[in-house]
Amino acid sequence: MRVKRREFVGLAVGTGVGWPLAAWAQPRNKMRRLGVLMGSLASDGEGQKRAAALAEGLDALNWRDGSNLSIDWRWGGGDPALFQRYASEMVALGPEALVAEASPSVEALRRQTSTIPIVFVIVTDPVGQGFVQSLRRPGGNVTGFSNYDPPMAGKWLGMLTQITPPVARVAVLYNPETAPYAGLYLRAIEELAPPFAVTVQTAPVSYSTTSRSNAASCSSTISRISSA
């Protein structure tokens, strides 16, 4: 049977979450509590699909929201202030386990608790970011799944030069507030740039409260680099 990646991740995370939920000594029919801090907006289609995959993964392990499990969902939407606020709210609710989607969610939840198990997904280099001691032995209360590999960023550059030749300058846009791991990708891109005779320029774009101002900031950054 062919299993889609999203479904696999949902089942895998569900398994990771199921362990701390089942580890407590209370009877299995007791309602447990799970907190899920998503990195995207609640209106994001892909985010909703990942949330559904998690619910399906838990359901496959007989953990059902509204039956023997109460799931508290929060959506950070890339806003650093919301990540901190929701992480504090979730820990205050006293869940048996927490799920963190993306690095900002993990960082926010780690600041609030060192005892509640945290299972992360879609995190780049969890060892380099200090979330776990090692992939084999995470240590502490944080574990999870990483589906990104920084060296892949170098291959993106190679693909770009093939798709739109000739490429002389490449701008790497990122939000330093929500992508603390950007340096890992930047190093890989910069190391591969000389063979392609490409100049790489970083273009950090900070979070803004409106999509219009954020788009304007991106346009301004791209225009500045293009005219260099």
Image: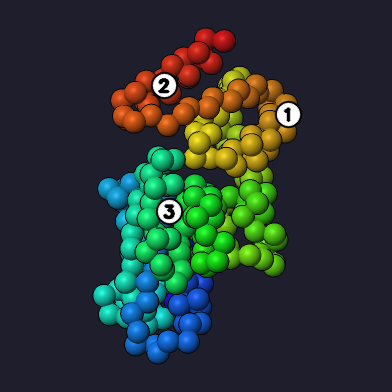
Looking at the rendering, in which quadrant would you find the N terminus? bottom left
In this rendering, is residue 184 above or below 24? above
Position of residue 194 in the picture relative to residue 61 (left or right) = right
Q: Which residue is mark 2?
A: 217
Q: Nearer the viewer, residue 57 or 110?
A: 110
In this rendering, is residue 220 above or below 5? above
Q: Which residue is mark 1?
A: 195
Q: Position of residue 217 (x, y in %)?
A: 41, 21
Q: Which residue is mark 3?
A: 87
Q: Secondary structure at mark 1?
A: helix
Q: Residue flagged by tag 2: what amino acid is it?
A: Ser
Position of residue 18 in the picture relative to residue 73 (left or right) = right
Q: Residue flagged by tag 3: what amino acid is it?
A: Ala
Q: Position of residue 163 (x, y in %)?
A: 52, 32
Q: Residue flagged by tag 1: what amino acid is it?
A: Pro
Query: For mark 3, does the 10 Å Cα neighbourhood hold few (<14), some (14 to 19), or many (20 or more) residues?
Result: many
Closer to the observer: label 1 or label 3? 3
Between discs 1 and 3, the one toward the N terminus: 3
